[in-house]
Amino acid sequence: MINGDLEGELERRAPGAWELYRKSAETRELDVSATSRGEIRRKEDGWAARWWAGGLRFASASDPGRLVAAMALAARLPALEEAPPPLPRRDVSREGTAGAAEPAPELFAPLAQLVSEKSRGEAVLSSLTVRRGRAVEEIVNAAGLSVRMESSRIDGVARALGRRGSRACERLSVFRWDAEPDLAGLAGRLADGATLPLATRGPSFPRGAWLLDPAVASAMLAAIAPIFEAETLPRWVKRGDLASRRVTIADDASADAPCDGEGTTTRRVLVLEAGALATRLHDVRSAARASAHLTGHGVRPSYRVPPRPGPRRLFIETAGGVAPPDLLAGVSRGIFARALTAPVGVDLEADRYTVEFTGVTILAGRASEPVAGARVAGRISEFLARIAGVATDRQFFPMPYPVGAPTLLVERANFE
């Protein structure tokens, strides 16, 4: 039981049609550069209530007393006209607490050495922010649900500065690790991102194959992810033929939590199977509107806003993939996009995308020369249909939820 008084108040206001949520979190943050060092400790306690009384109502606050006041205010405001959806029923209540968050790990020195090695001395690690956090989420509802979930993670931001003569370039890279820190992968992305733009040439040919590094491919997947939760799909989307048959995309957050932000059991969901749209991601409200089964994708970006449908851990399957060198060996002429130089731009309604990146030219299956900057623009539908190869080197990146992709081979692209 989160708070018996609040549960009683919600039952009085909306018999059989309410939900109560609490999140307690603590984060230890370590900021390090070559000349400074700082530590920050943050704590958060948030409460949220959602109930259906004459329509949908929502209130949030930082403690139970303030939540009661917020509920009284919300009850006087116009409600969103909506019938109560079926609420999840499950009891996975657990004893104990998550305890205090441990200090963030000391990673600046080893990462700085790797960045220098991978860039042959042309780049230095300028700053590193590492956060280690722990959180406890609790959910109860009028259907008898009682859920308690504990989670922890390490994430952060690293910056590297590349120099070549009088030219300089800064690279920022975000990261999240669920297991041991992948310093080598992070160092490689920082080194390439800080030094490749210092090359003097852009693309030397107008078209060819296009290889996408896992970080670039993950950013592209995150940009088109709203398709998988949309109630109305863009007109260009063909359900049975959205992408190449080599592409299967799943969402499975069971490694992060047993339930979603509404208490629905987490499970593996295929949203794209062999190129065809398979399932839409649902929270309790969207599932009720669509007369569909719950998928466990009610997400809460913050306790201050109601849950909504969305991805939780989205990734491209790699079971049928090949080793990255084998993917590279099949390219006669192309460009390997190693790092983005701007956020991926998409217009889902118009079926358009733009990717700006820096990378390396590929000739006869071998890396050739750096590309200072390139741009590929076109139709999302064509990009998805032209994916000719999927590697096995999947990596996850925070966007802000985990998004994972391997190296991808697009058989044809126009370079600017």
Image (tube, rainbow, N blue to C red):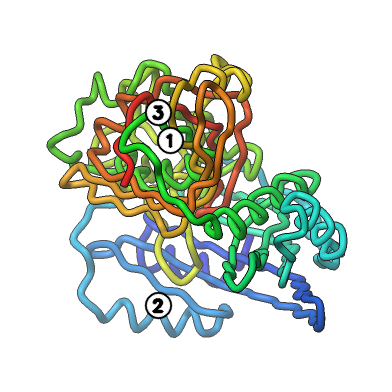
Q: Position of residue 178 (x, y in %)?
A: 71, 46
Q: With 96 as the anchor, is 255 left or right in this view?
A: left
Question: What residue do we see at 74% from left, 65% from top?
Answer: 124
Amino acid type, residue under disc 2 in the picture: Met
Q: Earlier in the sequence, mark 2 or mark 3?
A: 2
Q: Residue furthest left?
A: 235
Question: Tag on residue 71?
Answer: 2
Q: Quadrant of residue 292?
A: top left
The amino acid beneath tag 1 is: Thr
- Whole-angstrom CA distance, mark 2 to mark 3, is 57 Å
Left or right side of 273 for 260: right
Q: Residue at the location (33% across, 41% down)?
A: 415
Per the image, the residue denoted by label 3 is: 209
* Left or right: where 45 falls relative to 343: right
**Which residue is labeled 1 in the image?**
295
Where disc 2 sits, the SS reads helix
Residue 380, above or below 80: above
Residue, x 37% and y 24% (percent of image)?
411
Q: Quadrant for residue 23, please give it.
A: bottom right
CA gap between label 1 and label 2 equals: 29 Å
Tell us which disc is closer to us: 2 or 3.
3
Q: List x then y, in percent, for residue 5.
A: 56, 72
Pair 1/2: label in front: 1
**Looking at the image, which is closer to me, 353 or 348?**
353
In the picture, the disc for residue 266 is none
Q: Which of the 4 image quarters holds residue 323?
A: top right
Residue 234: where, in percent of width, then height?
17, 40
The quarter of the image holding the N terminus is bottom right
Residue type marked 3: Ala
